[in-house]
């Protein structure tokens, strides 16, 4: 079965544009399958893309210290970020995407904790990029392509 | 379960903490092999150690602190720790240990590895507590006038004695209500 991801991408786009109310409204319209499969896949793809964009320079992934510092800093961005972002899961998720960990390293991560952690981290990293509208469109196109690939 | 009525903080425990602060964790390791064979025997030493850790975090963070200060502090400690060691400790366990030491009431029961079966948790907890204790102590020592060890020993002894008394009373109470 082919999962459609248009609604999920719209919700994510709203989130990245700072339209939180619209993001919540669109998410509330998704079925639990559309959330658990489609939205999780969209978040994972966006997380993959933005993490590599931020932490790979000249083809080299950032060191562990930089990741530890970033996660600690990110957990101070909002009042509840400290609880939403699990530091160990965040570091594993980032280092995994950067290719610094073995292929099975992410398997031990609880799905819900991983989803929560990545959702907030991805929003923070996209905000830090300060995309123009056209840059955000280009980024979303990449996320769409990656998501389609991952769901095939 | 530890029978707290058999535990009393005495000269051995006081001397052990003094040794730990003066000579470092290796000295404690030696004691561990010699004197902490049973839970009851180890309990007094562990209370002294937790008390010293608690004194350290209270001295460092005082009453006014934010959770994010603790998060940032733990991140810095882990970065330092990893420079000298290829191991690491869990940031969440370290943060929660510090928050517990500061009397943070918002912590949930599951936030803190207390069960001895949680071997990984307890190992991370002790590593983190040791590292925090020495970070705070050694930083203070740089500007102290030489009495710092005794200050820590005295404060930790009083705290550990109070904790043991509280545990004894709690256990007595449980027994009384169980009969």
Image (cartoon, rainbow, N blue to C red):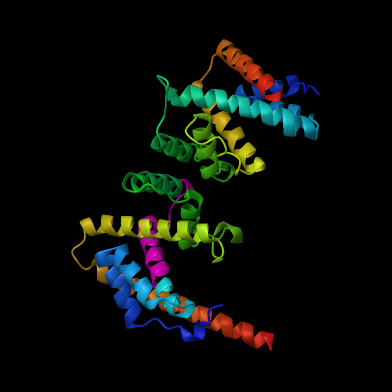
**B149 left or right of A90 in image:** left
Q: Looking at the picture, does residue B155 appear above or below residue A71?
A: below
- Please tell me which residue lies in front, B5 or B156: B5
**B70 left or right of A41 in image:** left
Where does the image place residue A63, in percent across and percent down from the top left? 40, 33
Question: Can residue A3 be seen from the camera position used here?
Answer: yes
**A111 left or right of B69 in image:** right
At a point 37% along the width and 60% down the height, the residue shown is B130
Q: Looking at the picture, does residue A81 appear above or below residue B160?
A: above
Where does the image place residue A10, in percent across and percent down from the top left? 70, 20
Quarter the N terminus of chain B occupies: bottom right
Q: Is B50 one of the magenta-colored residues?
A: yes
Question: Can residue B151 be seen from the camera position used here?
Answer: no
Quarter the C terminus of chain B occupies: bottom right
Q: Looking at the picture, does residue B130 appear above or below residue B40?
A: above
User: What stretch of residues is rendered in magenta?
Assistant: B48-68
At a point 63% along the width and 86% down the height, the residue shown is B175
- Please tell me which residue lies in front, A27 or B77: B77
Where does the image place residue B29, in percent across and percent down from the top left? 34, 67
Asked which quadrant contains residue B148, the reply is: bottom left
At a point 46% along the width and 59% down the height, the residue shown is B123
Q: Residue furthest left?
A: B145
**B103 left or right of B11 in image:** right
Secondary structure predominantly adopted by residues drawn in magenta:
helix
- Please tell me which residue lies in front, A119 or B19: B19
Where does the image place residue B155, in percent across and percent down from the top left? 34, 72
Q: Is B53 one of the magenta-colored residues?
A: yes
């Amino acid at each position: 079965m082919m999962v459609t991801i248009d609604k999920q991408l719209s919700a994510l786009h709203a989130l990245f544009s700072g339209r939180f109310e619209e993001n919540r409204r669109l998410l509330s319209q998704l079925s639990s399958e559309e959330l658990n499969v489609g939205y999780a896949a969209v978040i994972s793809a966006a997380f993959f893309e933005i993490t590599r964009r931020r932490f790979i320079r000249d083809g080299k992934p950032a060191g562990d210290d930089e990741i530890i510092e970033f996660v600690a800093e990110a957990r101070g961005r909002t009042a509840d970020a400290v609880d939403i972002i699990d530091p160990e899961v965040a570091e594993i998720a980032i280092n995994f995407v950067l290719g610094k960990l073995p292929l099975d390293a992410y398997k031990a991560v609880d799905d819900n904790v991983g989803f929560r952690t990545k959702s907030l981290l991805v929003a923070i990293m996209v905000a830090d990029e300060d995309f123009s509208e056209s840059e955000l469109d280009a980024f979303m196109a990449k996320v769409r392509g990656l998501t389609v690939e991952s769901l095939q | 379960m530890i029978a707290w009525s058999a535990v009393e903080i005495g000269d051995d425990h006081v001397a052990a903490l003094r040794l730990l602060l003066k000579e470092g964790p290796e000295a404690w390791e030696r004691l561990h092999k010699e004197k902490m064979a049973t839970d009851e025997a180890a309990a007094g030493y562990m209370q002294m150690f937790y008390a010293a850790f608690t004194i350290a975090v209270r001295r460092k963070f005082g009453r006014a602190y934010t959770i994010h200060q603790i998060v940032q502090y733990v991140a810095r400690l882990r970065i330092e720790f990893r420079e000298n060691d290829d191991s690491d400790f869990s940031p969440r366990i370290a943060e929660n240990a510090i928050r517990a030491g500061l009397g943070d009431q918002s912590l949930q029961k599951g936030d803190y590895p207390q069960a001895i079966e949680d071997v990984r948790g307890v190992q991370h907890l002790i590593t983190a507590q040791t590292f925090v204790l020495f970070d705070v102590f050694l930083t203070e020592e740089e500007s102290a006038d030489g009495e710092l060890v005794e200050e820590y020993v005295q404060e930790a002894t009083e705290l550990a004695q109070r904790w043991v008394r509280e545990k004894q009373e709690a256990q007595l109470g449980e027994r009384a209500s169980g009969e």
